[in-house]
Image: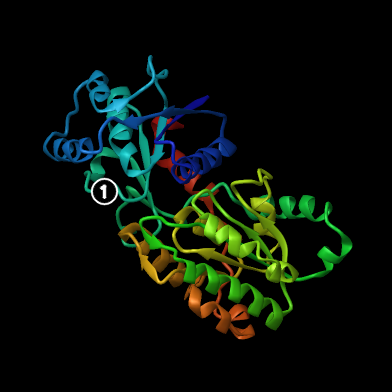
Amino acid sequence: MLRILIPSDGKPGHYKKSAAIAGAIAAAQPADVSFLNVRMRLALFHDILRRHFRRHRQLPGPRWLRLFYRLPEPLPAPPGLIISSGGKTTFVNAWLAQHYGCPNVFIGDTRGISDEYFSRIVVHDASHDRDPRFISSLIPTEITLELLERAAEAYTTTREPAFRSRRHWTLLIGGDSGGYRFRQADWEALGAAIRELGERHGIRWLITTSRRTSRAADAVLQNPELTPYIDELQIYRTDPRRIYNALLGCGEAIFCTEDSGTMLTEAAAANKPLFSIRPRVAAATPALRDLLQFYESQGRLKRLAIAEMSLLQTDDVSQGFRKQPDQGLSAVGARILETLPAAA
């Protein structure tokens, strides 16, 4: 049985990507997947380690790794394959792979660390197509069309018949993050758009907030004036129901605040018209900018300012999107297994 180790920095968006690829591999052959929780002791260690990795191809024993990271004791049994995502796991991934002498996979930009430290690198662009070390793929996510269909079916059976007869759009709401700052005016413009689009298009909204959503946003969404246009409002801080996948599955179109690459990736996996919506103060990180450009080039996403939402016409929602094949993670997993004999 293939033993797969996933170093995780605790960020859901990172370990979900790794778990998605590990799951695709496990579907192709027996595998045991385990997680190794790691925490960098100080942020300044990131630059120190980057400089060390650039100067030294051979790394010292793993006991040195504990100087920079909090790691469980003892380390896990030797794996046959290491997979990780997230800049702070790159060093752990490369270090342990060299220590154990096993192949390793990194998902995303290696952030200035030599590609030679990794057996395979999964990226969401085609700029490295001639380099066999790279595998071009959509951003890995555990969201699949089948999963969303099952979640939507289970959810709708609990609702009244009138719910099932109506058309719905889904709205995923984040909050302040990186260069994105949501002000009261942004939330009020969003509330106005909910009302205006509901009236114009004859739809009801399915809305869920997130851990970053402010109380100011919650207050706008809970305004009784919006109630006639909303069939579901899940406030993250007070509503623990697990209906996220169901809401993705039920909506004909999906709107997602632009601050969260994870939510955008999960929404894109639903293979429906997708709009990213942004506040007035919006400065995407390079990684998020690349992701948005990639999804735009794929015909999966259109970008909007929140202030522009109310202007959407029927053609804006029904045209300009391209249906895409499913994630193709099985092909990614197969390629990893084919090209990594030590892991097979």
Q: Residues within 10 Å of mark 1 (few under 14, many from 20)?
A: few
> Looking at the picture, which amino acid does disc 1 mark?
Arg
Work out whether 51 lies above or below 257: above
- In the displayed structure image, the side of residue 264 where residue 89 appears, left or right: left
Q: Pinpoint residue 299: horizontal percent, then vertical percent.
A: 50, 72
Residue 173 seen anywhere in this rendered image of the structure: no
How many numbered callouts? 1
Scheme of image coloration? rainbow
Looking at this view, is 156 or 174 the one in front? 174
Q: Secondary structure at mark 1?
A: loop
Looking at this view, is 339 or 322 the one in front? 322
Q: Label 1 belongs to which residue? A: 111
Looking at this view, is 280 or 126 the one in front? 280
Q: Quadrant of residue 67?
A: top left
Name the outermost residue toward the right: 161
Q: Quadrant of residue 225?
A: bottom right
Q: Pinpoint residue 258: horizontal percent, then vertical percent.
A: 46, 63
Residue 250 seen anywhere in this rendered image of the structure: yes
Name the outermost residue toward the left: 55
- In the displayed structure image, the side of residue 50 where residue 101 appears, left or right: right
**Residue at 54% from the left image edge and 54% from the top image edge:** 328
**Residue at 55% from the left image edge and 61% from the top image edge:** 217
- In the displayed structure image, the side of residue 77 where residue 246 appears, left or right: right
Work out whether 194 lies above or below 3: below
Looking at this view, is 306 or 60 the one in front? 306
Q: Pinpoint residue 95: horizontal percent, then vertical percent.
A: 27, 29
Q: Quadrant of residue 49?
A: top left
